[in-house]
Amino acid sequence: MAARRRFIAILTFLAGLYFLLEFVLPPTVPGRTSRGIYLSHDPTVVRLRTGAGDFVDVAVRPGVELSMMVRDPTGKLQAKVQRTREVSVGETLTARTRTFVFGGLRNGLVVDAEGAVAALRPGEQLYLDGSEETPADLAALPIGSKVRVEVRSARVAEVQWGSVTLLQNRERATIQLGPHVAVLREKRKGTPDEIEPYEARVGDTLAIGHTTFLRDQRDTAAQFNTVLGTLALGMGLLSLAMVNGRKLKRSGEDRWVALAFFAAVAVGVCAGVYKYYDPNTTERAFSDTIVFRLLGPVGSTIFSLLAFYLASAAYRAFRIRSAEAALMMATALIVMLGQTPFGMYLTGWLGEQLKALWLPNVAGWILRVPNSAVVRGLIFGTMLGGIGTALRYWLNLEKGSAMGGGD
Amino acid sequence: MDNANWQVLLLMVVFAGLVLWKIGSARKGRQLYIRPIPGLNAIEEAVGRSAELGGPLLFHGGIADFTNVQTLAAVGILEHICKTAAKYGNRILVTTAMPVMVPIWEDVIKASFAAAGRPELANWSEVRFISPAGDLTALGTTQLLVDEKVSSCFLFGAYDYTSLLYSEGGQIAGCMQIAGTSDYYQIPFFVASCDYVVMVEELFACSAYLTREPTMLGSVVGQDLGKLFLLLLILAGVIGATLFGSGNPLNVYESLLRF
């Protein structure tokens, strides 16, 4: 137990130290960061090699999106948008090169809604917006449809890094972009935003520099949680199956509930698998029925229970049983009446000179002044409590089971 | 980017410094006082009531996983509830919407009952993952309260709009309920439907309060000093704004805190 406790303590400390340093240290290495006013930039060009062997040069401009397919905690493949600085040679990417409104075909060439030729380069394919699965059939594509041009699952063959021109000390300076070079846009208040170079506007103050090692590893560190979550989903299902399995063994009404559970799991698994079938198939219709026509309304019904629960909770809360309850009742009455036209009707006769006493104004004051003060107090408490608890866990001062069990 | 600027860094150093200073004082043996928290004092009453009525206890550790600091606070509370339940021989049901929390709650129950000398109670207790959907879990928990004739219910951790589904369900089932959260928008719902509510930073003080461990008590006193520091800062800000006016360069205080 002592060894386990020590192991958890060391691991917690190291993980905490990583996230603390990642938060405290500046996002870019101070000695390798250039600061100045944005003037212009040359875009980075990513050369992609498709499965068919075609090369497509993608200049990273507004409307272009580079993404990588990753698995989410449920194991489903999802597109994760990549920053340009994260792109490296050899990895497989999907690039959305442009979107436009389909204007039909002219002499075999695709044209947009304005009639301009939007020819597809070898390796590029047209997808109907909203449809992820298969490339659009050009002959059957309705004119006026929003389409996007994509290069799917292509390998990065080469990256020609662009540059940004800044005004520094009244002189132009060209800063070379590259892997792990972040572009930060400074704000009047708050910490700077990381942007793509094309998002900068002339006059923006930018800081461009090599990111810290810690910053680059943040996503990888966060993936530990995703991995644990994926493993735990199985454990959760196992827990449910064990509870319902025990019910099945016992005789009584519970047995039917347990049977219903196992039947629901089977239906749910089928609905999940059939979700990836073509839209016009029976399987997909089955999945849509379960998800949209059964689970959706059930969720809404449960949510609507809140209205009745709110009414009964409010009834109990507003019963005047003490001085505090009376104060709460009076305040609630003022705030509620103040939010309705009836509040103005009740106090409007007081006239302009006494408008501070109009119910809407009194209600506004209650919300703006005493209520805000209380909420801020609560926020301070939460923040300090969070810091204290985090420190206790980080420095292994918490003596409970969560840190390795027992006293 | 979520990086600290120098003002945030300064405040972090001050707050962490105060907490560490008080922990150091506590370790040297200095007696520290923290005010009574009625909600936590009532845990024993709730467990005792449950033992008298013969029903199990139900604990729900909020809607978040272990990456949320409120869930970590709830772990300490479950541990204390288990140790108190061991005295009376109660079993505990834990429900969750987070699969990742199932082994953690199970481990806490086993370790706590074992530490209290009643490991067999862990076998009678159960951790139930109900559904990943919060509202379905709330409804499932409410059903469990009725089916298992639960007499005392504990709701500690992070909550969203489902807070009322849990607490009002317990109210309808006739349970004695103690709730605690630092999600301040959910506090009014708990106040309206629970017998005791542990609010905001009280939740984070729970493990220290319940264990009376000096180093943990020191961290709670350090938090209170941090609040005092913030109060003084606000007071200084009010005086600065009153004397020099907002936007005046002489109002150094305002320009220092502009972040």
Image (tube, rainbow, N blue to C red):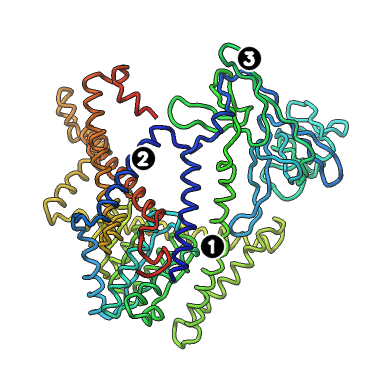
Query: In the shown orientation, is residue A252 left or right of residue A37?
Result: left
Q: Is residue A161 left or right of residue A325?
A: right
Q: Residue A144 appears in which quarter of the rendering?
A: top right
Q: Secondary structure at mark 3?
A: strand
Label 3, label 2: how far apart the Cα atoms are: 39 Å
Q: Nearer the viewer, mark 2 or mark 1?
A: 2
What secondary structure is found at the residue carrying circle 1? helix
- Circle 2 sits on which residue? B13
Residue A120: image quadrant is top right
Q: Which residue is outermost to the front? A: B28
- Mark 1 and mark 3 on one chain: yes
Instruction: Say above or below: B63 vs B121.
Output: above
Q: Position of residue A205 (x, y in %)?
A: 53, 22
- Residue drawn at x 21%, y 64% as measured from the top left: B41
Q: Chain of mark 3?
A: A
Residue A6 in view, yes or no = yes
Query: Which residue in the structure is indicated by mark 1?
Result: A294
Q: Nearer the viewer, residue B241 or A391?
A: A391
Residue A151 occupies which quadrant of the picture?
top right
- Are there few (<14), some (14-19), or many (20+) residues within 10 Å of tag 2? few
Q: Residue furthest left?
A: A323
- Of labels 1 and 3, earlier in sequence is 3
Q: Is the residue B49 above or below the residue B15 in the image?
A: below
Determine which of the numbered discs, if any, sits on residue A172 in the image.
Answer: 3
Query: Residue B126 in the image: x percent, y percent?
Result: 41, 75
Q: What kind of residue is marked 2?
A: Val
Residue type at mark 3 is Arg
Q: Is residue A280 left or right of residue B167?
A: right
